[in-house]
Amino acid sequence: MKKMTYLLTVIGAIQIILGIFYLFFPEFILKSIGHSIPQANIYYPLAMLAARFIAYGIALIYIAKEPLNLETAVEQGFCGKSECERQGTASRQWP
């Protein structure tokens, strides 16, 4: 269980750091991974991507506190609604 908590915390921190870099330093991050400098109109989609990275990072760190108690929440949040319905997890009650 300790490994799961550690893993979720590390991945959450990486997501938050990546989101901050995409939000505040998009040119630097794109240059460092080998992309050319995009036109100015691409920064809005990059900001949306950054917001998603930050939100997932916060969620992963929150889930890392008690991963087993939040198992159903993880299933509901990280798989699409139709996928949950196919797996039969959509009818479960929240803890």
Image: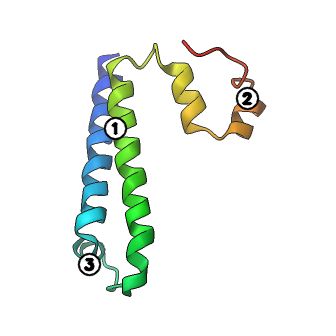
The kind of secondary structure element at disc 2 is helix
Q: Which residue is mark 3?
A: 31
Name which quarter of the figure residue 92 lies in: top right
Work out whether mark 3 precedes mark 2 in sequence or the reverse, and give the earlier one: 3
Circle 2 residues within 10 Å: few <14, some 14–19, many ≥20: few
Residue located at (74% from left, 39% from top):
82
The kind of secondary structure element at disc 1 is helix
From the image, which quarter does the N terminus lie in?
Answer: top left
Residues 64 and 39: in front is 39
Work out whether mark 2 precedes mark 1 in sequence or the reverse, and give the earlier one: 1
Name which quarter of the figure residue 33 lies in: bottom left
Q: Amino acid at mark 3?
A: Lys
Q: Which circle, 3 or 1, is nearer the viewer?
A: 1
Tags 3 and 2 touching, CB below 8 Å = no
Residue located at (77% from left, 33% from top):
86
Q: Which residue is mark 2?
A: 87
Mark number, residue 39? none
The kind of secondary structure element at disc 3 is helix
Tags 3 and 1 touching, CB below 8 Å = no
Q: Position of residue 3 (x, y in %)?
A: 31, 23
The answer to whether residue 81 is left or right of residue 21 is: right
Q: Compared with residue 68, is residue 30 higher up or lower down, i.e. above or below?
A: below
From the image, which quarter does the C terminus lie in?
Answer: top right
Residue farthest along the right direction in this orientation:
86
Q: Amino acid at mark 2?
A: Gln
Residue located at (56% from left, 21% from top):
72
Q: Which residue is mark 1?
A: 58
Q: Position of residue 42 (x, y in %)?
A: 42, 78
